[in-house]
Amino acid sequence: MVYVSVLNRDHAGLPFGIAMELMARADFVQSLNAVCAKCGGDDAYFTQRVISGKEVFGERVKVGGKELYEPRCRRCFVKP
């Protein structure tokens, strides 16, 4: 048995190719979500890149944690 944890979308809301490939090959997929960091009420299905609370966009992969990314619901997620 193999367990894999991946984000299914990048900070612009676009699918990560490898995540889609892994999910297509899996026998079982369990999707988890967080609570939106902006409104605090809805399920967060997106990851928003932020600097000082402002949405930013750029290179597809940038290593960081809660100082650079926050979970967002569909309503609060900002597209580039």
Image (tube, grey):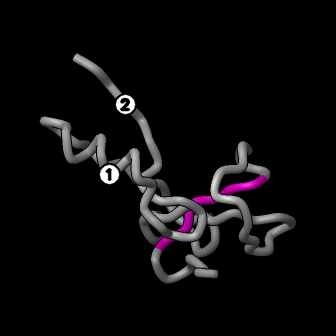
Tag in front: 2 or 1: 1
Q: Which mark is residue 60?
A: none
Q: Which mark is residue 4?
A: 2
| Percent of width and height locating residue 31 | 31, 49
| Percent of width and height locating residue 9 | 47, 59
In the image, residue 28 sits, relative to residue 67, either above or below, namely above
Choose between 52 and 37: the one closer to the eye. 52
Q: Earlier in the sequence, mark 2 or mark 1?
A: 2
| Percent of width and height locating residue 20 | 32, 51
In the image, residue 42 sits, relative to residue 33, either above or below, namely below
Left or right of residue 80, residue 68 in this image: right
Q: Is the Cβ of the residue at disc 2 closer than 8 Å to that at disc 1?
A: no
Magenta-colored stretch includes residue 69: yes
Decide whether the magenta segment is chiefly helix, strand or loop.
Answer: strand
SS at badge 2: loop
Magenta region, residue range: 68-73
Amino acid type, callout 2: Val
Rendered residue at 73%/44% (across/down): 64
Picture quadrant where residue 48 is located: bottom right
Quarter placement of the N terminus: top left
Amino acid type, callout 1: Met
Q: Which mark is residue 20?
A: 1
Choose between 7 and 38: the one closer to the eye. 7
SS at badge 1: helix
Give the CA distance from mark 2 to mark 1.
12 Å
Left or right of residue 24, residue 33 in this image: right
Rendered residue at 19%/39% (across/down): 25
Rendered residue at 42%/65% (across/down): 43
Rendered residue at 45%/54% (across/down): 16
Left or right of residue 52, residue 78 in this image: left
| Percent of width and height locating residue 37 | 62, 64
